[in-house]
Structures are given as structure tokens and as C-alpha cells.
Amino acid sequence: MTGVELHHGVATDVGLVREVNEDAFLVAPPVFVVADGMGGHDRGDVAAGIVVEEFGRLADQGYDPARGAAVIAETFVECQVRIAEYDASQRAQGATDFHAGTTAVVALLIEQSGKPKWLLANLGDSRVYRYNHGALEQVSVDHSLVQELVESGAITQSAAAVHPERHVITRALGGSGSTEADYFVLPLSAAERLVLCSDGVSGMIDDRRIEEILGSAGDPRDAADQMVAAAVAAGGRDNATAVVVDVVGLVAETPYDSERQRVSLETKLGALP
Amino acid sequence: MSDDSVWSYRPGDWLAIFGAATTLLLPASEKARAAQLWDLVDGGAGFDQTLDWVLAPGLSVLPAFVLIATDEGPTKVIVRGQGVRATLTTEAETVVLDGSTVTTWVERTLDRVTALSVEVGDGVDGPDHLIRGGLVRVARIDLPPYSPPVEEQPEPVLPPLDRPDADPVDADPVDDESEESGPEEAVEPPELLTEPMPLPISEPSPVWDDDAATVPPPPPPPPAPPLPPPYVPPVLPPGDLAGGDHDGMTQAGESSDEFAHPQPGIPGQPPAPSVTRPVAKLVISSGETVAVDRVVLIGRAPEARRFTATEQPRLVTVPSPLHEISSTHVEVRPGTGADHGSAVVTDMGSTNGTVLAQPGLGPEDLKPGIAVQLIPGAVINLGDGVTIQVTNP
């Protein structure tokens, strides 16, 4: 049995325009989350906070690494219920037509056929990238109007970046749209570095710039700092948050080391006592 | 009778669940079962379904109960137990069903019932309270609400939360008198019940808001998230495009249906795991055996892209020391449509291709992205000495 060593870095910034940071993040290995509370919605920071809380509980209590997507789907349902309750409580206090909303991207270690893998989930237009052998690739597919237009061939990717409705997302937690997330499974070897970020990063700096930063910053903490700093320097028109996770290695269990290294992945993930 | 019937009940120690389509009464001792069935009955379960669940643990362990169908169609009533009696009044007749007289139960179906009354207590006197739906402790229930022949309607009812005798949940865990009260029950004259009653259904009656006033019952089913009104995407002022971005413009928008991918399942509900029977079995030369009951992705380091929570693919890693096999090389999945019941294989755009040998046919190269139906006995060759044999499940 092998363990997985993860190094991570995280940075967030309110940006230069907004007054409130409605982004939220969770770094609780092996669970990582970025949630972008929606600016057009009231109190998106509360909705984003709920997502982080629920996944934080998942990280604390542990989960069955073999169940994968079902674990995330159940947590999303919890989030959706709590956001709806929050809406109801706000409406009860007189805020008519209140609804909070948030995006979410999640990275979680799971186990398949005895091997640890990344399970990624996406709901909205926050993104997951992977950086492997010097090349950046966007893994998640935005749930946005412009992405649908791009996929249908109506507009090009470059036109999408300046489309007036590029901020309109088609799926999110809270609100009336679909809450069905997309899921992805990657072997650890296929993502030596994983990036979760809000559109305050990916909307301000292009993929080439992100690739440069990830290539030059060895430490994931530096990489996260630099990505957010670059997004702010480019205008900082939205809250910017980046989580960078490096798979440092599959650590073989060795008899000379401490008891901690002998525990199985299941135990580390909390599925077993 | 309509599903929004307003009942009246007289506090007692039996447990009554007033649902949309059925009303169920259980003895005081059946608290756990009442809690169990609350969800079902309140959810609008029909007569047969409710009966199934009531009887699930067996008839012998349930000394008494009353089940009434109040939805569309004729009124159906089942009565079981000592001292349990239902009185049904139609224009033509009055029928009394007495649970004391039989060993199993009494069932009756009647059309056009104008009044229905069930007594399970030992004839305690009012007051009667109105109820539309909920779980309460009762001695007697009436549809339409009971009204004394001469006196006026009881005063507008106080919310039962303020009345200890009407609070069903934590009411005294006392007496099982109701069950031993059979004999005296039987002698009580039924005339009270069969009298023509003023039917308040057509006139406004002092019905209290059942949301506010009924019991806080066992935990209600988790609410489906309420759907707020659709968000209308903002229209940007013209000329603003040059100015570039807006801060915080991330908005929820409606998907343009034209391009939307259909999403399975019910929004807001946890997706049910999709379990299908395996249509084939893959015996891989590396030693692994995999059932094709879902999408199976095979390769040197396979990845799964953009799937939903209900259809998580199985990833199968095969050794490829020479790297002849691509990271995600082929997909095998249960076929749909014309291929239903068998497995289909698709080359995922592998670098070095895939060779398929079906029984009785020569080897063929798979075209990337084109699914081919698999016959048991087929062999898929990925290169690097890795072959996959297809067998019956």
C-alpha cells in the first residue's frame, strides 16, 4: 500500500474593484475546494462559505475513497439544501426574492482498483487545470453560456473571452439552474500539479500566463501567490483565488519509518477507524 | 371526497396520521411505527401502498388499526381491533364497521359517503379540533368535522401547541386503555354519529393554518430545494464592451436550451446509483477480470472526462512497458439502442490503434471514435502484448 504526499499552496485576493471577497477555499488534504460566491446574487460569500464548510466536514469525518463521485454528489445536495434554507431565512426577514449562489470546483483523492486517483468535480465557471510535463491543460469544462456557444460552434474560444455574457453561468449551487456537476478522474501520474481557481484568476490572465507561472514557481505556495498577484495586476476586477496542489510522490510504505506511514490510505482518508 | 378534506379530531391516545390520500390510525403502543409511516402517509401514499407498509411486520403484531382512503373515488375503510368502530353515512344508509366482531379485519368500500366517523377511544367528550393534515393523538375523528347537533360549533380552535392534551408527540406516554376499552365502547349508542349533520364543508369554517398549528411531527422529508424565480441575465449597457470587464458579474443564467446537454435525474435530488446488469466480462491478459456493467476505460493511465455522479466509469490500468498503449486507449460500455444487451468497444483515439478479432471474422482495425458491437469470444488487442478477451458475464 502506498500513501500519497501532497504539497499545496493557496492565495486569495479581493481584487481592486470589489469590496467583499465572495470567494472561499478549502485546503484540507486530501480535499481541496474553491467556491466563487456569485456577485449578482445577494451574499454569495455565505453560499461559498457553506460549500467550504460542508466539504470541510467531509475532510474531518472522512469518506469512503471507493465511492468517489457519490460522496461529492451527496455533499453538493447538502450544500444546496443549506443554501435554500439560508435563502428562506433571508426571505422570512423581508428580503424578497433573495437567493444566494456559488460555483464549486472540488479535488478529492479517491481509490480505484487499489490505486489512489484524483476525482475532480465542477459546477459553474471556476476551473481545474492540470500541469504536466511543462504543459497546462484545462480539465474542467465551464458551465457557462459562452462555453455552450463555443461547443456548438457559434463562436470561437477567443471570442468567448470578450463575449458580453461570458459571466453568465448555466449551473451552480443555489438558484434555479441545474446542480448536476461534471466529474473527472485522473491518475495521479497524469497531474503532477493541479490548480483550482475562480474566474477572477482565469478571467484576468490567460492560460499561457498561468502556464508560465506554474513552470517557473517550484513551490506550490509561490505558484498560488503569483497567479493571484498576476490576476490583480491585470486589473483585479473580481475576487481571485487559486489553490495549487503538487503530488510530490507515491510514498512507498517502508518498515523503518514511523507508525503513521504504515496506515493504509483508507485509514488516512478516515474511512477506517 | 377530496384530498383537501378537513377532519375534526377529539384528543385521545391513539395516533392518527392525516395524509393527502389516506388517513391512518394506530394504537398508542405503535408510536415507532407511526413515526415510520408518517413520511409515507404525509407524502400522499395511496391506500394499497400504505396498507402494504402497515402490514409489513405481520398482522399478528398489530392488534388494531384503521385505514381510510379519502382520495378520489369511493371511500374505502379497513377496521381492525377491539373497540374500534367506524361509521359511514351515505344518502341511503348508515354502515357501522366494528373491529370487535372479527378476528382479522372489516373492510368496506362505499360510494358517495356524506359523513365518516371513527371512534377508538373510550367515549371521551370533546372538544373537537379541526385538522387538514398531520400526526395527532386522537380518540375519535370525523369527516366532515364533528358538530354537536344543537350547540354551535366549538369555539375557534386554539393551536394545539398550546394545549397539552392535543400535543401528539410528547403527550403522556401513559395508558393503553384504548385497547381494553372495547366492551364499553360497544354499548355506546351510535345515534350521535348517524344523525344528519350540518356539513360545514361548503361554508367557511374556522380552519387554522395547518402549517402553523399542527404538530411538529417526526422529521419531515428533506425539502427539495425551493426553486427561486429564474434569474434574468443582466443586459449590459451598449458601448460598455470597450470598457471590458465588470466586477463580480458572475451570474446564474438559464442554459440556452438549444445547446444544453440533458441532465438526468431530478434537480436537487441525490442521484440514484445506476446499477445495470453486466452485459459482458472482459478477461485481460494482465490477469484482471472486469464486468461491463458501466463504462470501462482501459489504458496505460486511463482518465475519465466529464461524467455524472451516477455513471462513474471504471478505469482499468494495463501495463505497457514500451508505451505502445495510450493513456486512455479503448472504452468498452454496455450498448444502447440496436446494441442493447451487448458490449460495444470504441478506440479513444489511441496513438497506435486497436485490433479487434471477432469470432469467425478476420482481425479489423478499430476506427477512432466508432463503436463496434462485441460478440462473446472476441479478442481486443491493445499492443504491448495486452489482449482483452470478451466473454459472457
Image: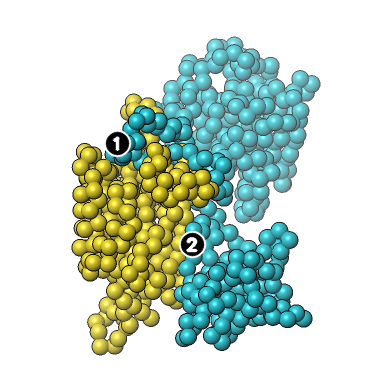
Residue B235 drawn at (x, y percent): 40, 30
Element on which disc 2 rests: strand
Q: From what the image shows, is residue B165 above or below residue A74?
A: above
The residue shown at (43%, 75%) is A115
Chain B color in figure: cyan
Q: Which mark is residue B243?
A: 1
Residue A14 drawn at (x, y percent): 22, 45
Residue farthest right in this picture? B92
Mark 1 or mark 2: which comes first in sequence? 1
Residue bearing mark 2: B305
In the displayed structure, does residue A120 sit left or right of residue B325?
Answer: left
The chain drawn in yellow is A
Q: Amino acid at mark 1?
A: Gly
> Viewer-proximal residue, B135 or B358?
B358
Whether residue B118 is visible: yes
Q: State the image quarter where residue B370 is shown.
A: bottom right
